[in-house]
Amino acid sequence: MPDDLTAAATFWGGRLGIPPHAFLAAVFAGSDDHVLIGRTSEVAWWRIIADRLHVGEDVVAAIRHDLTVRQTWDTDLLTGLRRVRDRATIAIVSNAWPDMRESIADAGWDFADAIILSCDVGYAKPDVRIYETALHRIGVDAGDALFIDDTPGHVETARSLGMTGHIHTHTGETLDRIEHFVQSQGPGGPPT
């Protein structure tokens, strides 16, 4: 679990008088089948969260704001992706709630040729359709793509489709892997 979520769960669990895991369950349990794939609006999901936590709209708004400001991006990784931009096609595939669109725009992900969000396409990793959608949008075959994710099961699905896979655990190693892959593909570079 990302550090920002652990910290938020500890803070809000303490404030609401519930264990951190109960806070996380109230926010995320069932979201994969609803808001993450666009079947339930984010507004409706936050109403469900309010009911689960027995709090009013003001507290839900504070939780939502807090989760947003705690979210951080790996700036070294983003800088590295910008460096290979002229030598590779880049697609971002993310299991994301709709509010992620604004966060991505604010973070300046202009280096990406395609951004595929689960909430937009209606399926999430490790569903093979989201990988196929990404490959289609950037116009490449699976064998010419490097897929990077911090969830091993997501990487295994990519590999099962014929992509090269890398499990992200350290930014420096991931950037080295990207550079090696780009160089191995020759002039014009591959998609990543």
Image (cartoon, helix red, strand yellow):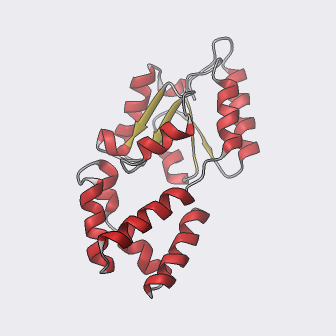
Quadrant holding the C terminus: top right
Residue 182 lies in quadrant: top right
Quadrant holding the N terminus: bottom right
Q: Position of residue 109 (x, y in %)?
A: 55, 33
Residue 174 lies in quadrant: top right
Return the residue found at the far bottom: 17
Which is more toward the observer, 175 or 105? 105
Return the residue found at the far top: 187
Please give left or right for residue 134 compared with residue 174 in the image. left
Residue 23 in the image: above or below residue 142: below
Which is more toward the observer, 105 or 38? 105
Return the residue found at the far front: 58
Q: Position of residue 146 (x, y in %)?
A: 58, 32
Which is more toward the observer, 30 or 49? 49
Let me know if residue 182 appears in the view: yes
Please give left or right for residue 14 compared with residue 118 in the image. right
Q: Residue at x 50, y 53 (%)?
A: 153
Please give left or right for residue 25 compared with residue 75 in the image. left
Q: Residue at x 31, y 39 (%)?
A: 121
Residue 83 in the image: above or below residue 129: above
Q: Residue at x 50, y 36 (%)?
A: 92
Let me know if residue 1 appears in the view: no
